[in-house]
Image (cartoon, coloured by chain):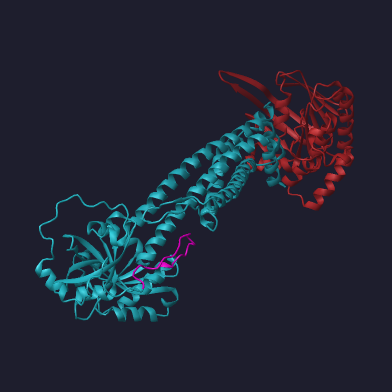
Chain colours: A red, B cyan
Amino acid sequence: MSDVVSLKRVSKTYHLDLVSVPALTGIDLEVRADCFTVISGPSGSGKTTLLNLIGCIDQPDAGEVRVADRDVHRLSDDALSDFRARHIGFIFQNFNLLPVLTVAENVEYPLLLARVAAAERRRRVAELLEAVGIGDKARALPGQLSGGQRQRVAVARALAPAPRLVLADEPTANLDSHTGEQIIALMRRMQEQHHASFVFSSHDPKVLAAADDAVMIRDGRIERIERRAA
Amino acid sequence: MKTLALALRNLLRNRRRSLTTLSAMLVGAVTILLFGGYSRNVTYGLQTGFVTRSGHLQIQRKDYFLYGTGNPAAYGIADYERVIAVVKRDPVLAPMLRVVTPTISLGGIAGNFAAGVSRTVIGSGVVVEDRNRMRRWNDYGMRFNYSPSPLTGTPENAVVLGVGVARVLELCEPLGVPDCRPPARAKAAGERVPQDVAALAALEARPEKSAGEARIELLAANVHGAPNVASLVAVKAEQQGFKELDDMMVGMHLAQAQRLLYGNERPQATAVVLQLAHTSQIPAAKARLAELLATTLKEEPLEVQDFATLNPFYGQAVGMFAAIFGFMAVLIGAIVLFTVGNTMSMAVVERTAEIGTLRAMGLRRSGIRGLFMLEGLLLGLFGAAAGVAVALGVAALVNRSGLTWLPPGQVDPVPLTVHVWGEPGLIFGTAAGLALVAVVSAWWPARRAARLRIVDALRHV
């Protein structure tokens, strides 16, 4: 099983007025393809920073980041944008759906950015909405949906451009436990169906339990990595 | 999509704020258009006044415009009839021409010797039928009533006086001039016509003065510098629109003016007046006339002056209105700039997390910039469109209101009209200007949105 993400000696420090806060220090990490990987650790441990670097929405101060066979730390801002549009999907804690677009349009938007043809867009949107169980909500606005339904839309949106990597930052944090379990099950199923690599940041035990690989992080350093599946 | 759909829906997201911004733009657009329409109306009114009086173009002897008024006889066009014939026959000019007519300007002294009064005057000799056709020119559809020249159907010795001339010459009663108090002065010693002047006037064939007739004597220097006097009958005192003209103007038949200046010699004209179908034809007509003056009509040193040169007041008035319009447009532009800028800045702050999401999904910085600038453009277009619609409605109301006013250079009050409909340049210029200002004002917030760090934007609450 090849690696979809590879980080070598990656460091990141935040500079806040007069103080510098090291968020990550000398991170070496390989994320296996087609796996359900969870990054876990206490608050302030650097989970989100690590996820941001893997998701190419932030740049390391030092080290190398390789995602989907590209050295992304060398790419320009526009090239990174194009790379994200084609290879990375995002699921946010607060769902972050565009409130003025319908459910179907939200799912379609990343396909527009990836320049997918209109007919193919329509087919993929319908297929994904059915797959996440909200085919009947295609014309609804996000404000008309429950939290669980919104996160389902977010999952469908993240998978729309058929990315190699889907990143989810605390995807169940704003959901009740039952809905959270449903979303975890959904994401697991979608990961297997779409052969995408899912990387989460979470300290939800249920997410952790569902993971193929678990990366424990503390004080900006990887404490241990548990490889649970072959 | 969808950038356009997204931008449109984002505008509808905060309807109250968008409506407030649109209202500011609407008021701005209406103000610009109504004032623009009003100033167009004044400009067209002035232009119509000048063109009906002095035509679009005048062919004059070289330097007449600068020096000729002091000695018009020396700056006459000797073969003016040939000039007129050539101009009328010319295949390029002919389709543009409405009237081609000779005219004479002269300086002299008009006297009512029976009353012992006289004053210096400017005489203007015209072909009455041609002038009546010129008076009908109304290319801009101005609302005024055509009235023929008071010289129409009068004998050759008839004249029209400016109201001021009639007052000074104490001809108020026979000419029906209002507000004409009897002069509080002692009678001059010479109550009778001086003998030398009487002798000169006697050379002119004149009927006996009838009761109530307003007779004047007009003294002018002929082409040789010798004095020449005509005994004339004033048929009407007419407002000229400017006091300076009212106090100086004596209008007469061309033949009479020619006899005063040239006696029995071959008559000349001080100018050939050309009235075109449309003012926009002036450049083409001038260019063609320049060719003719350099070739077919090169025997005499002639030049062409347009109505704006002949009437500097026109350019001054147009310039003044343009300056006021520009000042007003800049002020309104600044208000729109800050209003739209403020709206877009608030939108950027409110949608920071959304900007982060879009960027994370792969929308480039330019895409974010374009989205907010498109929202600014849409605001501008909607504001301008609403402004145009309201301005057209208000203009139609004003035009039907029956209000009147007295524009500069006019004699009678004219309906207050606002010329917005039928002014595509004004309408589209205003709309495009407002849209441009809206885009420019959205540029800075859009730039700020595009430069946000994705992780910072996503963290924004």
In the rendered image, residue B427 lying in the magenta stretch gets the answer: no
Task: Determine the main secondary structure of the stretch shown in magenta.
Answer: loop
Q: Is residue B407 left or right of residue B436?
A: left
Q: Residue at x 68, y 23 (%)?
A: A24
The residue lying at 71 percent from left, 22 percent from top is: A46
Whether residue B206 is visible to the viewer of this picture, yes or no, is yes
Q: Position of residue B264 (x, y in %)?
A: 19, 81
Magenta span has B137?
Answer: yes
Quadrant for the N terminus of chain A in the image:
top right
Query: Quarter of the image holding residue A109?
Result: top right
Q: Which residues are magenta?
A: B135-152
**In which quadrant of the rendered view does residue B271 lie?**
bottom left
Q: Is residue B279 above or below residue B326?
A: below
Q: Nearer the viewer, residue A9 or B2?
A: B2
**Residue A49 image offset from top left, x and y in percent:** 70, 26
Q: Is residue B245 visible?
A: no
What residue is shown at x 55% (from left), y 36% (from top)?
B339
In the rendered structure, the answer to whether residue B213 lies left or right of residue B376 reads: left
The image shows residue B129 at horizontal and vertical percentages of 37, 74
Pick the residue in front: B186 or B255. B186
| Total residue callouts | 0
Q: Position of residue B27 (x, y in %)?
A: 55, 42
Q: Quadrant of residue B361?
A: top right
Name the residue at 67% across, 42% down: B7
Q: Is residue B354 left or right of residue B149?
A: right
The residue sitting at the front extreme is B211
Q: Quadrant of the C terminus of chain A?
A: top right
